[in-house]
Each structure stands twice: as C-alpha cells, then as structure tokens.
Amino acid sequence: MKIVVCIKQVPETNNVTIDPVTHNLDRRGLAGVMNPFDKNAIELALHLKDTATEDVQVALLTMGPDDYAESLREGMAMGADTGYLLSDRAFAGADTLATGYVIAQALKKIGDADLILFGRQAVDADTGQVGPIVAEFLHQPQITYAASLRLSGKNEVTAERLLEDTKQTLVAQLPAVVSVRSELNTPRYPTPRNIQLSFDKPLTVWHHDDLDLDDSRLGQAGSPTIVTKVYAPKPVKRELTPLTGTPSEAASQLIKALKGRQLI
Amino acid sequence: MPSTTAAAEKLLLQMVDDYTEREISPEDMPMDAAGDFPAGFMQKLTDTGFLGIMLPQEFGGAGFGPEVTAKALNHIARGNASTAVTLEGHFKTIDQILKFGTPALQKQLLPSANDRIFAFSMTEASGGSNPLGISSTATREGDHWVINGDKIMITNGGLAQVYCVLVKTAPKELSVFVVDQDMPGFSFGKREDFIGLSGTPVGEIVMDHIIVDDDHLLGKLGDGGIIGDSAHDDARILMGAVLTGIMEHELKIATDYAKERKAGDTPLTALQVTHRKVADIAMRKETTRLLYQNAAKLKAAGQPYSEEAAMAKAHGSRAAVSAGDDTLQILAGYGYSREYPVEHLIRDARAMEIAEGTVEKMRSAIATAEFNK
C-alpha cells in the first residue's frame, strides 16, 4: 500500500506581512515550520503503517522553495519513507487551484497512491481547499475533516466526520483523498536518532520540466483568485454589564437580561 | 541549503524545544514541589529517544556531537534543570565508556544506554574531592574481581541501572569498574534530601561482594584518576549548558515581569535600576554560553578542554545564582514567593557550585593551568 501525505511549510511566526502588490502573504525572510495540522495526517499514515499487516510505504509531498525540504525531513524523521519537493519559480504565487493542479500532476507521476492525506487546513491561509481540489483533478472520492479513519476492507476506508450537530460515517473506495482533523491523533515526536537517519532517506526534487504541466495553469498567472484588499477588521465596541451579588442573584440578572433582549 | 549536519542540528533543537514546551516545562513547578519526576516522565523521555542523543549510531543512538548535545541540554534546561542534569549524568558516563571501554565492553553495554540510565560514582562519605581517600575496593580473587564499598551523592543514584564506580585496586591505585543494579550484592541506599534540582535523584549505592570479570574494568588498572577527571570535564561542559538554560529562564521571567509591572506610574522597564539588573543577567547568560560552547567546540575538535570546561561551570554556576538573585529582586515579593519559579531556580543553580567539583576546586584547576602555560 502506498500513502502520500501532502504537507505545507508555513511561517513560524504570526507576525506576517502582506505583499502590497499581490495582497498575498509575504513569506520572504520568514523562518518556516511544518503546518501543525499536517502532522496529524502524517501520524495517521504512520499509524496505518505501524498497524497494517501488509507493507505500507509513506511518502510526503510538498510544493515550495528549496528550504521546504526541512519540513519533508521532519516528516521523514517522524517515520515517513520518502519525500518529494516540487520547486520551481514557475510555481510561485499559486493560489489553491494552481497549487492543487501541480500537486495532482505530481501525484500522477508518483503513481499508485492508494490513499492521499491532507491536514485539515494550513494555519497561514486557512482555506482547506487544496485537498478537495486535488481529489477533483484526480477524479477520486474525497472525505474532508475526518475525525477517525480505518482501513475497513480491501481497497476501502471508513471515516467519521464530526459536523456541528451530526456525525457522519463515510465509506470510500481507494484510491481516495482524505483531509483529517487535529482531534484525530497526537502526532509523535521525531526521535533524535530518526532525525539523523532521515537524511539517508530519498528526497526527490521535481522542477517544472520534470512534470507534465500546462503552463497556463501555473503560478500567479494560472491563479483565478485575486486578492483585492486585505485589512484588519475594526474592533467592535461591546457593552459590558457587570453582574453583582451572590452567584444565584447574578444568574437571575443574566437570565432577566437575556430574556429582555429576547435571546432566550 | 544548509549542510546535513546543520540541518539535523536545527531539526533536533526544534524537536527539543517542542518537547520541552509541551512535556517538560509544565512539570517544572510540580516537580520542585513533589521532589521527584512525575510518574511516566522518564519513560516518555526515554521512549522519545533522549537518552541516545550523543550515543553513536552503531549502538542505536543518534550520534550527535558534543556541541549539539550541549545545546540540547541548554534548551531543555530552559524548561527544567533537573531533566537536563539527569541527562548530563547519563551522557558523561557514556562518554567515559566510549573513551576508555574496550570494544567488547562497549558492544555489551552501550546498546542498552538508549533505554537504561547510566551513572558515574566517585564520592564516598570520606569526601568528594579527595579520590585517594575512598574506601571502596576491587580485590582480585582467582580470575575475577570482588567489589565492596559504599558510594554516595551519585547523580541519578537510585534511578540509573548501570554505574561506573571508582574503587581502589591497590592502596594508591584507583580504577573504574562498571557494575549493574541486577548484579548479586548490589543495592540502593538512601536518597539525598537536597534543596534544589528536586527532580534529579541523588543517592547511594551499596556494593557487597559484587563479582565481575576483567571485561568490566574501564581502561587499565590505575586509570581511575584519569577517567574521573575526564568524567568531570565532560560533565562541566554540560553543566555550563544547563546553567545557560537556567539563566535564559530567569531572564524571561525578569523581562516579562518588568514589561507588565509599574512602580507607581513608572513602568519597571523605564527604571535604570531594572536596566542594570536585566543587563547583568543577560551578560552572565551570554558569557556562560560562550564558555560552554567554546569548551564543547574544543572537545569536538579533539583539543584539550579541561580548563575551559572548568571555566564554564565555575563562572556559570555563580552567574546563574546571581542572575536568579537579580530576578528575584525585580519581582520583589513575588520573587520571594513559592508561587513563582525564581526561588527554585536559585536553588537549582546553587547545586552546580558544588557538584562535579566545587567552584573553589575549579578555580585551583584554572589557576594551575594558567601557571603551567
């Protein structure tokens, strides 16, 4: 079985700036770390590897500059077997659609992936869109926000989705694309020894010419998303009403106030 | 792209920081109050591979060098000094087996150092800085050795399973043997009730007619003094790293508090008296860092580092106590309270003015080295 986990490197700090021309996040000069939610997807893949009766190979895939290899190494130190880095100036400035396109083309080249995993979303842009986009490009079934997942039969996975007031149980035929919630598991730490050994594992870098790509779908030019304005929302001034007296009296005041506003 | 070595170091320290923030720092205050590691704490540390950071890869470890190993302890000590000191005691012992053990002994013992803690024991009731005053002996009987004696104040004593013990093999001959807690005749004695480094057990072992073969001798007969000095040197580098971590913790407490607190209408950050203290803490921290990193660099390069290691510990231990005192003064009443960690950081740092050779002994060693230049 082959599992490919798609990961992203995000700025280490919350103190990001916005590019005044493109209105995109300006990542230049910022130290990067692996998107924390992607560690849940890696942990799921490694758990399946640890518990499966058959041989499971776990590959990591990311798109970005050369230094994104650091996140691939970290994932390989957690236990993944191989890493793929998609790196080319032609990919720069991509929105989720252009990113999903390149990742899907890379997945076709890797070939034979039974399960493609994503973290819930990236903490820098918070879209959660790339996983579903990749599933559409590959014409594969998708399950988003999985809170649990198990191999439920040959070529089949069963996942639970926790929605606001509903729990869904979904079964998908493999190959499939799944994005996972952070509640799914607690990612393991890379051990010091595995950190060292991760540098002996294969890491493949693919540039533009290594993939079968339609240039009109790449980078900024291939991105239909246009950010016209980015601004910080103005803080809303809120009314503060102190509740006084004993807890019982305070509760009565609260109920009275909520009823007065027809909120309960 | 950085070199493999630099990239591995970065990943290791990133993991250490992550682990320290999530698993070690939250236990700092409870550990001091309880006087021990919490249940499962050491097992998790072991399972995550911390015991093998500097153990060569051929023995199942990670094989990081002296500089990275010291930095890792520095980072751990930002969260809790006891955890870092327990690892220091383990690493210095492994170092001596690597330096002086036969290939057969290394092959026999070191793979288990990934999940068993090792300790080095020299001190006896007769004193710690006078090795020839010890009473423990190894006596030749037939084709084996019989070890008798009582060792006290061992870092990790009671926690460790493997011990390098300094004994007399002749009236004026010191040697080191390796014993295991599972050997007949081995037992644990009392645990010290120290005022600081409360997580790290410091205790006694009793050796009553322990029988070992020649292969458990470290180095040659009579090498005990050299091995003991070597263990001290290696420990002192790591203690400099631990002390730097303590001072980083102290500095953060001092600056966080100063940025929040006012004296009357004046923020503490605007007062020269605060500037003086914060600057002194920062300078002490940085000088200790430079000293331990220099000693570690010399060790990694195969150069002599005994004097530099002594400087790191002698300077760093007093520096960390003084930095803690300044931090306490900035926090005033809160600093004197057990609700804040400052007071226990001072107690933790104070231990290192004594352990692995007193600061007085360090200064004698440094001065002697200077006279001999």
Image: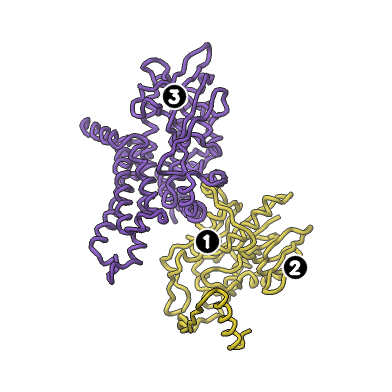
Tell me whether circle 2 and circle 1 mark residues in contact (CB < 8 Å). Answer: no
Residue reaching furthest to the right: A153
Chain B palette colour: purple
- Mark 1 residue element: strand
Residue A96 position within the rendered picture, expressed as x and y whole percent measured from the top left: 57, 73
Mark in the foreground, 3 or 2: 3
- Mark 3 residue element: strand
- Amino acid under label 2? Leu
Chain A palette colour: yellow
* Dot label at residue A170: 2
At x 46%, y 79%, the residue is A23
**Residue B296 shows up from this direction:** no
Residue, disc 1: A34
Q: Quadrant of the C terminus of chain B?
A: top left
- Position of residue A196 relative to residue B217, above or below, is below
Mark in the foreground, 1 or 3: 3
- Amino acid under label 1? Met
Residue, disc 3: B176
Residue closer to the observer: A233 or A137: A233
Mark in the foreground, 2 or 1: 2
Residue B264 sits in quarter: bottom left
Tell me whether circle 3 and circle 2 mark residues in contact (CB < 8 Å). Answer: no
- Amino acid under label 3? Val
Residue A182 sits in quarter: bottom right
In three-dimensional space, the C-alpha distance between marks 3 and 2, rounded to whole angstroms, equals: 64 Å
In three-dimensional space, the C-alpha distance between marks 1 and 3, rounded to whole angstroms, equals: 47 Å
Residues marked 1 and 3, same chain: no
Q: Quadrant of the N terminus of chain B?
A: bottom left
At x 32%, y 36%, the residue is B305
